[in-house]
Amino acid sequence: MTTFQQAQAEGLCLRFPNNIGIHREINYELAVEMLMRAVLTSQNTPFVWGFIDKPADGQILLLFLSTQAPFPNDGIRYQDAEVKYAMPVGTTRELEVHEAKCGFIPGSQDQNASRVRRRYRLVKGGHSQLVLVHYTRGQPAPIAPALANQPVRAYPLRTINEPPMFVIGDKAGQKVYPPGSSMHGPSSAPPMPPTAIGMGMNMSQQQAILAHQNNNMEMLERRREREREQNRNRSGSTGGRPPRPEDDDSGDDTEQIATRTLAFTRYKRNHDLMNEVFRQAAYGDKKERPYTSPYSIFNKDDLEAKAVKLEAEIETLKQKSASRKLQGAHDISMESFGDPIPV
C-alpha cells in the first residue's frame, strides 16, 4: 500500500479551504442553496488535502468525495448505523442525506453519545461529488462501556505536504504549487520523506492516475448497468413485481448543468451582446456628418401648386355654400305668403 493510500485509509480527503462558519441547524433548503453556490465557487477555488478530526458543534465542511468511497474517519465513534434517504427538490433536483447519530469522542469529556453528523449531496441537478457536512447535537444516549475509551484512529495524524488541487471545472485536476517551488520528475527529484504525498509526480504521471481512476469508474458503471439489466430480465420472466431501483451513484449526474450556472452563462452572453451595441455607440464613427435640412425631402414648387389648387377649391366651396343659404332664405319668405287662416 502506498503512502497516499495509507493516508486515505486514515481519513485524508479534499476539503474546501475557507471557513464556512458555524450553524446550529441547517434545513434542506439551505443545504441545497449552499451546494448550488459551491458548484460555482469550487470551479475557481482549489481544495486542500487534510483530515477531519473532532469537529466542533455546528461546524460545516465542504468536501470532494467519490460517490463510491466511504466517508473519511472524523475522529468520532457513532453507535448507531448511518441512515440514508433521498428527497426531491423541485422538479429537477434530488437531495441525498446521510445521518449518523449517537456519536462521541472516545477518551474525551463526552458524558453521553449525542453527536450527530449529517451530510448532503445533490444526486440530481448538481455535482454529486460535492458533499456538505454538518455536525450538531441530538438526543443523548448512554455510551457503551466497551467503546468509551476505544480509540477511533491513531494519533498523531500524518503531516500532509500535498499541494491544493482544483476538483471541478475547466481546471479540474490541476495542482496549485506555492510561489518559488518547482515540479520535478521522479528521476531528478531528491528523496522524499515518508509524509510527502505525490510531490515528485510529473504531469504524465498525474494524467495516468486520472486516466486509471476514470477507467475504474467506467468499469463500475458498466457492472452496475449489467446488474440492473439482469434484475429487469428476472422480474420480466417471473412476472413478479420489479425490484426497487438502486440509487444511481454514478458520475453521470455531474454532467447536468445547474440552474445558477446556466443563468450566469446567459447573463454573460447577453452582457457581451449588449457590450457590442454600446461600444459601437460610444466608440464608433466620430466624423461629423454634413447638416441636412429636415425639409429637404419636399419640393417647394409642388407644394405651392398644391396650395393654389386647394385655395381655388375652397373658394368654390364657399360660393356654393353661400348660394345654398340664399336659396333657402328665398324659399322661406315665399311660404310666409300662403293661404290666410280662416276665421
Image (cartoon, rainbow, N blue to C red):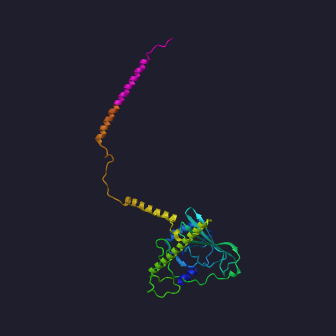
Image quadrant assignment for residue 153: bottom right
Q: Nearer the viewer, residue 89 or 135?
A: 89
- Name, please, the residue furthest toward the top: 343
Query: x%, y% of residue 300?
Result: 29, 42
The N terminus: image quadrant: bottom right
Q: Nearer the viewer, residue 165 or 223?
A: 223
- Name, please, the residue furthest toward the bottom: 191
Q: Nearer the viewer, residue 320 or 130?
A: 130
Answer whether residue 305 is visible to the viewer in this image.
yes
Seen at 36% across and 30% down, the residue is 317
Q: How many marks?
A: 0
Answer whether residue 177 is visible to the viewer in this image.
no
Query: x%, y% of residue 20?
Result: 56, 72
Drawn side of residue 175 relative to residue 299, left or right: right
Query: x%, y% of residue 269?
Result: 44, 62
- In reply to whether residue 89 is colored magenta, the answer given is no
- In reply to whether residue 335 is colored magenta, the answer given is yes
SS majority, magenta: helix
Q: Nearer the viewer, residue 343 or 257?
A: 257
Query: x%, y% of residue 49?
Result: 53, 78
Seen at 33% across and 34% down, the residue is 311
- Name, please, the residue furthest toward the front: 237
Residue 221, relative to residue 324: is it above or below? below
Look at the image and give the residue range highlighted in magenta. 316-343
Drawn side of residue 286 relative to residue 342, left or right: left
Seen at 35% across and 32% down, the residue is 314
Seen at 52% across and 75% down, the residue is 219
- Name, please, the residue furthest toward the left: 301
Residue 259, relative to residue 100: is it above or below? above
